[in-house]
């Protein structure tokens, strides 16, 4: 089935530094990737929609200058948390759907998530 | 905007018994999709079952089935013959047709008692 590989799975960084999270669709082309954030014991909240070759669309309240999203190819989208602060510590998850429908189940395939801790 | 409501923060069930998780949603669309996702402690999101709104027949996947009531905008998940491995967070999710994002409920934490 469709697989989305997300790296790193865990990262600890110092306050003020930047962290890049990668999501790759391994066996399908993802023209659109969705980025979610999940705080402990809470639900997944959509941060942004990433479209290949164009600028990402951010949800209200999400700082586009802090959370830089790049979707330069049909198989790779990246989220960079810039000048990270402790309040950015969270679980970040990407998801995508096979556009051709050959693997599609009308749902989305999720990456395994990245636990970011800013100290 | 669409919303998804899960009114049961926690549920528990005895092993081998049946449990039903509730979900309601709000939308003005006629074409949409509904899902139940399972999130175990690993936090990997796992699709449990899906339902297309245009289908009247309730979806089933082995021990998992749904009760889809379109007019009432209700989409409950029934887990039969519960197993210890079913213990997890369960999220109800909605999306419109097209390449649109999923909207999640707040989740229900299911415990399975041996």
Image (cartoon, helix red, strand yellow):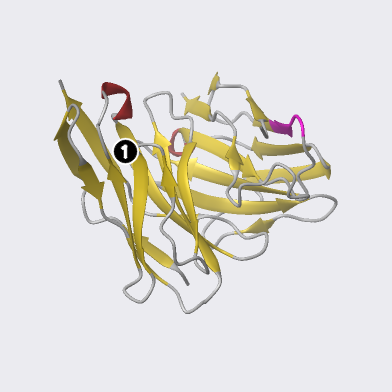
Q: Residue at x 71, y 37 (%)?
A: A78
For the image, the number of numbered tags is 1
Left or right of B75 in this view: B61: right
**Residue A53: % across, % down:** 85, 51
Left or right of A28 in this view: A58: left
Q: Residue at x 47, y 26 (%)?
A: A117
Subunit under mark 1: A
**Residue B65: % across, % down:** 36, 47
Please state the extent of the stretch shown in magenta in the rendering.
A23-27
Residue A25 lies in the magenta stretch: yes
Q: Nearer the viewer, residue B39 or A83?
A: B39
Quarter of the image that includes the C terminus of chain B: top left
Q: Quadrant of residue A16?
A: top right
User: Where does label 1 land, which residue?
Assistant: A41
Q: Residue at x 67, y 64 (%)?
A: B98
Q: Nearer the viewer, residue B106 or A3?
A: A3
Res A63 visible: no
Label the magenta part by its dominant secondary structure: strand
Res B26 visible: yes
Q: Secondary structure at mark 1?
A: loop
Q: Nearer the viewer, residue A65 or B48?
A: B48
Residue A69 lies in the magenta stretch: no
């Amino acid at each position: 089935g469709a697989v989305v590989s997300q790296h790193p799975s865990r990262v600890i960084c110092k306050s003020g530094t930047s962290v890049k999270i990668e999501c790759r669709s391994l066996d399908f082309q993802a023209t659109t990737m969705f980025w979610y954030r999940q705080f402990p014991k809470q639900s997944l909240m959509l941060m942004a929609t990433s479209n290949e070759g164009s600028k990402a669309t951010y949800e209200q309240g999400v700082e586009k200058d802090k959370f830089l999203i790049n979707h330069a190819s049909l198989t790779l989208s990246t989220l960079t948390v810039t000048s990270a602060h402790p309040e950015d510590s969270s679980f970040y998850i990407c998801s995508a759907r096979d556009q051709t429908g050959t693997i599609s189940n009308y749902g989305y395939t999720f990456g395994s998530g990245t636990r970011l801790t800013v100290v | 905007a669409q919303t998804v409501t899960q009114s049961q923060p926690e549920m528990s069930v005895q092993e081998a018994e049946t449990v039903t998780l509730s979900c309601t949603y709000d939308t003005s669309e006629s074409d949409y999709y509904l899902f139940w996702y399972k999130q175990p402690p690993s936090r990997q999101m796992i699709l449990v079952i899906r339902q297309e709104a245009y289908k009247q027949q309730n979806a089933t996947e082995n021990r998992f089935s749904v009760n889809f009531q379109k007019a009432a905008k209700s989409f409950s998940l029934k887990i039969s013959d519960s197993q210890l491995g079913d213990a997890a967070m369960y999220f109800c999710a909605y999306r419109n047709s097209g390449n649109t994002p999923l909207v999640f409920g707040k989740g229900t934490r299911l415990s399975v008692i041996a």
